[in-house]
C-alpha cells in the first residue's frame, strides 16, 4: 500500500509537514492545497506542488481538543 493510499487527505485548518516545514492548510482552491507557516510568516502562503509529500501532524479537531486553537 502506498503512502497516498494510507495518509488522510488534509482539510482546512489541519497541521501538516511539507518536508521539514510545519504548516497549516489555509485553503483548497480548485483541488490545490494552500499552506502557511504555523508561526510567523505574515501573509506568506504557498500552493502545495505534490500533496503526496505532505505528512499529517494533527487535524484541526485534534488541535482544538488540545487547546491549541
Image: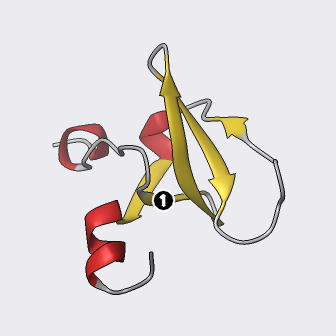
Q: Is residue 57 above or below residue 50?
A: below
- Left or right: where 50 falls relative to 45: left
Locate residue 23: give its quadrant: bottom right
Q: Quadrant of the N terminus?
A: top left
In the visual, does 39 lie left or right of 9? right
Q: Nearer the viewer, residue 7 or 14?
A: 14
> Furthest-top residue in view?
30
Where's residue 32, x and y in %? 52, 23
15 left or right, relative to 61:
right
Going 67% across and 51% down the picture, which residue do you hit?
A: 36
Query: 13 and 7: which one is in front?
Result: 13
Q: Position of residue 31 (x, y in %)?
A: 44, 19
Q: What residue do we see at 20% from left, 39% from top?
A: 5
Q: Residue furthest left?
A: 1
- Please tell me whether residue 22 is drawn above or below residue 64 in the rendered image: above
Residue 59 visible from this viewpoint: no
Question: Is residue 62 visible in the rendered structure shown here?
Answer: yes
- Indicate whether 11 appears above or below 61: above
The residue labelled by disc 1 is 16
Tag 1, which secondary structure? strand
- Give the quarter of the image for residue 67: bottom left
- Residue 63 % position (x, y): 36, 75
Quadrant of the snapshot with the C terminus: bottom left
Please provide percent x and percent y for residue 34. 59, 36
Residue placed furthest toward the bottom: 66
Q: Residues within 10 Å of mark 1 (few under 14, many from 20)?
A: many
Q: Is residue 24 left or right of residue 14?
A: right
Amino acid at each position: 500500500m502506498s503512502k497516498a493510499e494510507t495518509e488522510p487527505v488534509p482539510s482546512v485548518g489541519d497541521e501538516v509537514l511539507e518536508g521539514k516545514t510545519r504548516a497549516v492548510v489555509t485553503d483548497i482552491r480548485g483541488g490545490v492545497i494552500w499552506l502557511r507557516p504555523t508561526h510567523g510568516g505574515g501573509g506568506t502562503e504557498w500552493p502545495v506542488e505534490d500533496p503526496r509529500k505532505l505528512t499529517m501532524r494533527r487535524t484541526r479537531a485534534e488541535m482544538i481538543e488540545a487547546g491549541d486553537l
